[in-house]
Image: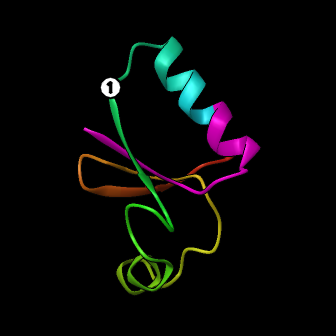
Amino acid sequence: MITVYTKDNCPSCVSLKATLTQEGKPFKEINIGKDITREDFMSKFPTVRTVPFTVVEGEANVNAS
């Protein structure tokens, strides 16, 4: 399963979600600020500073969008 962490007004997030949808890859979106607090996200992933951020099969991946 692919989990995509996003935020509002993020063109790279929109692009990644469109690509995953077009490729038929199912994903779960977690919006920072709506589905998870910024603080909880930073606590869970303390070194991540950009979105979109993905976790694939439990392994974190940095996106180059």
Q: Is-magenta flag for residue 49?
A: no
Task: Describe residue 1's horizontal placement relative to residue 4 as left or right.
Answer: left
Residue 15 in the figure: left or right of residue 32 = right
Residue 14 belongs to magenta span: yes
Of residues 34 and 17, the one nearer the viewer is 34
- The residue sitting at 65% across, 36% down in the picture is 14
Say which of 39 and 46 sits in front.
39
One can see residue 65 in this view: no
Q: Position of residue 37 (x, y in %)?
A: 43, 76
Q: Is residue 7 visible?
A: yes
Residue 34 screen position, x and y as percent: 45, 62
Q: Crowdedness of circle 1 by 10 Å Cα count: few (<14), some, many (20+)?
A: few
- Please state, as top left, top right, bottom left or bottom right, where the N terminus lies in the image: top left
Q: Which residues are magenta?
A: 1-15
Q: Mark 1 highlights which residue? A: 26
Say which residue appears at 40% left-offset and 13% top-offset. 24
Q: Is residue 1 above or below residue 8?
A: above
Residue drawn at (38%, 61%) of the image: 35
Residue 3 is left or right of residue 16, and the answer is left
Picture colour scheme: rainbow
Q: Give the SS element for disc 1.
A: loop
Above-or-below relation of 29 to 27: below
Q: Amino acid at mark 1?
A: Pro
Q: Position of residue 31 (x, y in %)?
A: 47, 56
